[in-house]
Amino acid sequence: MPTLTRLGHLADLNPDWLHFNRGIERETLRVDGEGHLAQTPHPRALGSALTHPSITTDYSESLLEFITSVHNRPEAALDELAQLHRFTYTQLPNEQLWPSSMPSVLPAETDIPIAQYGSSHVGRLKTIYRHGLWHRYGRVMQTIAGVHYNWSMPTEFWQDWAQRSGWEGNLQRFINDEYFALIRGFRRHSWLLLYLFGASPAIDRSFGHKGHNELIALGDDTLYSPYATTLRMSDMGYSNNAQSSLYVCFNSLQTYSETLTDAIHTPYPAYQALGTKVGDDYRQISANVLQIENEYYSDLRPKRVAHSGEKPIHALNERGVEYIEVRCLDIDPFTPLGVDTERMVFVDLFLFWCLVQDNSLVPKEECFKLRQNNLNVAAFGRDPELTLSIQGESVRLRDQGHKVLKSMLELAVEMDALLGGEGYQQAVAKQLAKIDDVSLTPSARFMELIKDRGSFRQAAQELAEQHRQSLAAQALNSDEQSLRATEAQRSLDEQARMEATNKGHFDEFLASYLRQ
């Protein structure tokens, strides 16, 4: 267990600098009244999926993504997220938002609609990238949804923290090093988030289950794994075998950039066989191991807001780490927004706990063991006999969970003393209860509901309707509705402007983009 030797640096710290910055990205499938994937285009009344800052699509035309701005209070982020949901529902009279990370009833694979972003060069790039994902991994996997949590510390904190740490060099370099230290701590302990917040123990049969004979049938349309916490993060989902041997080093910005860039520029025979462009149609952006850096699925990413047409890794290298993106959180099926304050407060504490540890470098061998820990917890996390590989030793998940949360409690006491109240200590206590009683985990609770209804499909549809009614009970006022409608129209106008001002041929644009 890493030691919190830097805990003393918190003494006399300005409490205002511990109001973390966070934003939420919530993905959710549009479905029809029978729980089938919606085949309708992205509603024009929601704006342009290419240019709207808050309502867009992910892989599929049916996979919505809500993006809040940055807030220093969890409640403010949730208020904005709720507004986005309510506005969206006013434009979906015959559809619902699916409440689970694992998808609804799916059609034949080629009938899963790929997201469309118009005819601008940037828009075409986004769609072609998704065609590449289809050819490489299939469309079904891309219908999985999650909650991404964007998190950062205020600039004033970094200035003070650098001084307390004895740093005298460039501040951004210090910030880069600190975020990557946080990432190393996160990767060693992210299995805990999968256990505590995983909520996808079952799938609809239409998802497919080739090679997964351990799944148990429930009724005609449901398959489940008896001990799973998050099939989304198992090798059935994003953590699939296609990238199992890919090594990206998170020890520093330099090693991260170098190993990721290497994958982006290394040809892969199977993808070369697909072809990049056949006739006038692109099948993928490139035939390399990764088309772009976003194709590498990690439970956490260092991020910097990129300019239009700029590659994310270029933005990181040029201007440094701005925030981190937590990507391993399932949608909470029991909450209308997929996430709530309780989860946010704990994740805030968890990330700050990762930051104030002494986090040694992660050797390549350990990196693969950490990945295996996560896969084991995703598939078997509720097995009382499950063990983890911790510093070369086999340790029961329950025992290690107690150790981590006890360490977090030390930090929670210090944080509550600085900020007042007992909010962080209460957050730890609630998660400790899940370690002691597995039936309190979201995966166990959701599985209980699924068994009671006899169907994953039925349980999710009931929750979707409950959430729709809950959101409708607090409709937007006329000013809020007008503001969202104006924002949507502005995004449509911006997409039209981009399409009208395309310069040069798309092939030249793509070549320039790949040279970054």
Image (cartoon, rainbow, N blue to C red):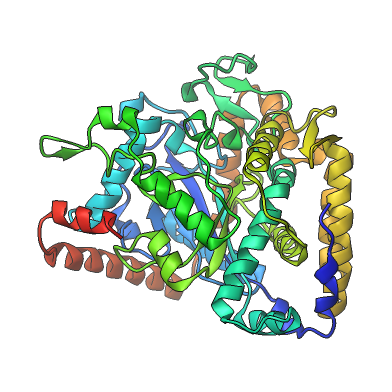
Quarter of the figure with residue 171: bottom right
Q: Where is residue 407? Give x, y as percent.
A: 87, 57
Q: Nearer the viewer, residue 288 or 470?
A: 288
Q: Where is residue 8? Give x, y as percent.
A: 85, 75
Answer with left or right where residue 403 lies relative to residue 147. Answer: right
What residue do we see at 35% from left, 63% from top?
52
Q: Quadrant of the C terminus?
A: bottom left
Q: Does residue 311 appear anywhere in the picture?
A: yes
Q: How many marks?
A: 0
Q: Does residue 429 appear anywhere in the picture?
A: no
Q: Nearer the viewer, residue 418 or 371?
A: 371
193 lies above or below 71: above
Q: Nearer the viewer, residue 255 or 514?
A: 255
What residue do we see at 84% from left, 57% from top?
428
448 lies above or below 30: above
What residue do we see at 56% from left, 42% from top?
99
269 lies above or below 347: above
Q: Where is residue 228? Give x, y as percent.
A: 69, 30
Quarter of the figure with residue 466: top right
324 lies above or below 197: below
Quarter of the figure with residue 218: top right
Answer with left or right where residue 317 lies relative to residue 160. Answer: left
Answer with left or right where residue 33 lies relative to residue 340. Answer: left
Q: Where is residue 515? Give x, y as percent.
A: 27, 57
